[in-house]
Image: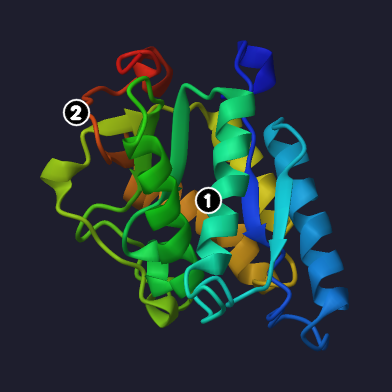
Amino acid sequence: MRRGAGHTCGSSFATRGDASAPETDLVSGPAIAARRTEEARCAASALGAAEPVFYDFGDGKLGEIVRPPSGTLRTLKQALAATIAAERPDIIVTWGPDGGYGHPDHRLVTAVTSEIVASQDVRPLLLYAAAARGELPQVPVVEATGWAETAPDLLTVRARFEPQDLAAASRAFACHASQYDAASRAALVPLFGSVTWKDGVPFRPALDGAVGHDLLSLRRTTR
């Protein structure tokens, strides 16, 4: 999904991750937000993707109780819906219901995104990022966070990749120096490539049935 392949890929972030940068001495707040914003931009550039969209909700606060109780999520829904309407994407990839590793904000972004797409008669193909049961690398950084696993029969869509795509993913992951130590940033993407992704990065179709190993060939099956 690189621009050079004739496709445009972008990303949206509900928060700037201002609560945590474990590989730094920064305290929660604007300094972490600025650091992680630049890391997100670095990763997008490494992947040849468009400039990220940031919605600026507080890290860890998407589910906070306000008045009305759903006020924060309602505002997030409006922001996401506006982006989807403007960009008219063929494919949307978000976290699975597990939030990847249980992160509450991730789970809520999944729920709101799914709600928006499910309301549309003409909708993009919504895919949940996932890892097949038993195929996660057995390394501390993965085990410590408790990454979720999915039954293999549900992962009916895969995105084939070339060595240069894996190299770009490694460069993108290396951008996140505030989140992962140098050894993890160097090793994790190659490990996923050989252990988890192998014949293609797996996805779980969220709302519409889709089967195939060439992700981009599926992009208009629901239109």
- At 50% across and 26% down in the image, what residue appears? 162
Which residue does the numbered mark 1 point to in the structure image?
A: 77
- Depth check: give the residue in front, 152 or 120: 120
Image side of residue 134 versus residue 197, left or right: left
Image side of residue 23 versus residue 108, left or right: right
- Depth check: give the residue in front, 109 or 91: 109
State the quadrant of the N terminus: top right
Label 2 Cα neighbours within 10 Å, binned few <14 / some 14-19 / many ≥20: few
- At 83% across and 67% down in the image, what residue appears? 35
Count of numbered tags: 2
Quarter occupied by residue 213: top left
Which residue does the numbered mark 2 point to in the structure image?
A: 209
Q: CA distance from mark 1 to mark 2?
A: 24 Å
Q: Amino acid at mark 1?
A: Lys
Residue 171 lies, in percent from the top left, at 70, 46
Image side of residue 171 versus residue 161, left or right: right
Quarter occupied by residue 83: top right
Residue 52 in the image: above or below residue 73? above
Residue 152 lies, in percent from the top left, at 16, 47
Residue 172 in the image: above or below residue 163? below
Residue 60 lies, in percent from the top left, at 58, 77
Residue 167 shows up from this direction: no
- Mark sitting on residue 87: none
Q: Secondary structure at mark 1?
A: helix
Label 1 Cα neighbours within 10 Å, binned few <14 / some 14-19 / many ≥20: some
Q: Amino acid at mark 2?
A: Gly
Q: Secondary structure at mark 2?
A: loop
- At 68% across and 15% down in the image, what residue appears? 4
